[in-house]
Amino acid sequence: KWRVVGGSGSGSLTVATTTGDVTIAATTDVQLVNLTSAIATITLPAVASGKLIRIKDIAGTATTFNITILRGGSSLIDDQTSLVMTQNYQSINLVCDGTNWYAV
């Protein structure tokens, strides 16, 4: 767990790690992706207003393995059904307005 420092909150972030395909749990705040030999599909949880999810590629292998982020249900991600992370150590922050997800 990470601790939030400063701001109005002092709670913990829930961090999960995967080495392959996964649907992010509604309680997960940070999804680490450690791919060493394959691509992965990461599916977002159902929409929840104000939910922020961080996705981070932590593998850093010599070869880049794409990470495809899929919408959960009928929501969109920046007006698309998916996003693809293509760089080693890339990360993305996604926030939900209760209807769709947006990269921020």
Image: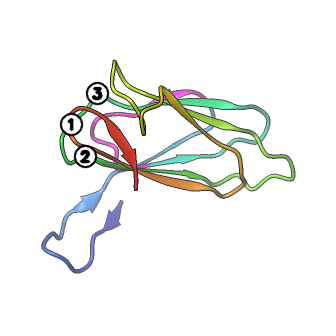
**Residue that badge 1 annotates:** 48
Gap in Å between the C-alphas at discs 1 and 3?
A: 7 Å
**Which residue is at the far bottom?**
6
**Residue 99 at x, y = what percent?**
23, 32
Q: Secondary structure at mark 3?
A: loop
Residue designated by label 3: 46
Q: Secondary structure at mark 1?
A: loop
Compared to residue 11, the image places residue 7 above or below, namely below
Circle 2: residue type: Lys
Q: Which numbered disc, 3 or 2, marks the residue that appears first in the sequence?
A: 3
At x 70% / y 38%, what residue is drawn? 66
Quadrant the C terminus occupies = bottom left
Mark 2 near mark 1, Cβ–Cβ under 8 Å?
yes
Q: Is residue 54 left or right of residue 13?
A: right
Cβ atoms under marks 1 and 3 closer than 8 Å = yes
Tell me which segment is drawn in magenta: 21-30
Residue indicated by mark 2: 51
**In this rendering, would 80 be left or right of 86?**
left
Q: Is residue 73 above or below residue 79?
A: above
